[in-house]
Image (cartoon, rainbow, N blue to C red):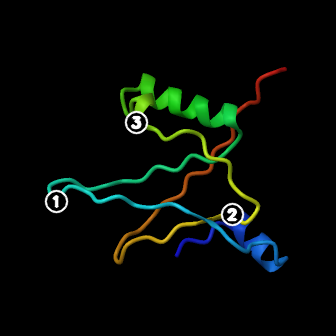
């Protein structure tokens, strides 16, 4: 199970009760599935998705709709043998 730092802090305060479960659909045997998770403000997530689209990495239409993270957090349960790497990056906020 993956425990993200902000979820761990909520758990210590007793605020995590029912996390959001993200289903992992079946993958094709000849392909390896990589999951990309972008967490931030709606504007920031849309900007990151747009950037990946411009770089021809991922079409905007292949992303899910934006999902609001519940107060209980997100629970990610990888398959046996999977690993992960986390990139944390700050971006300049746009002026309102």
Label 2 to label 3, Cα distance in Å?
A: 24 Å
Q: Which mark is residue 75?
A: none
Compared to 16, does 34 lie above or below?
above
**Residue at (52% x, 33% y) in the render:** 49
Q: Name the element at disc 2.
A: loop
Please provide percent x and percent y for residue 8. 72, 73
For this view, does 95 lie left or right of residue 64? right
Label of residue 62 in the image: 3
Choose top left, top right, bottom left or bottom right for residue 82: bottom left
Of 18 and 95, the residue lying toward us:
18
Q: Residue furthest left?
A: 30
Residue 66 vertical placement versus 96 (above, below): below
Task: Please report whichever mark, 1 or 2, sits nearer to the chain's N-terminal start.
Answer: 1
Label 1: which residue?
A: 29
Check disc 3 and report its element: helix, strand or loop. Answer: helix
Badge 2 or badge 3: first in the primary sequence? 3
> What residue is pinned by disc 2?
73
The answer to whether residue 37 is left or right of residue 20 is left
Neighbour class for label 3 at 10 Å: few (<14), some, many (≥20)? Answer: few
Question: Who comes first in sequence, dot 3 or dot 1?
Answer: 1
Secondary structure under the numbered disc 1 in the rendered image: loop
């Amino acid at each position: 199970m993956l425990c993200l730092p902000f979820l761990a802090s909520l758990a210590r305060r007793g605020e995590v009760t029912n996390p959001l479960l993200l289903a992992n659909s079946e993958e094709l045997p000849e392909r390896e599935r990589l999951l990309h998770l972008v967490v931030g403000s709606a504007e920031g997530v849309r900007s990151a998705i747009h950037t990946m689209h411009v770089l021809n990495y991922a079409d905007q239409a292949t992303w899910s709709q934006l999902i609001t993270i519940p107060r209980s957090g997100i629970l990610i349960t990888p398959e046996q043998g999977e690993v992960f790497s986390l990139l944390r990056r700050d971006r300049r906020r746009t002026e309102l």
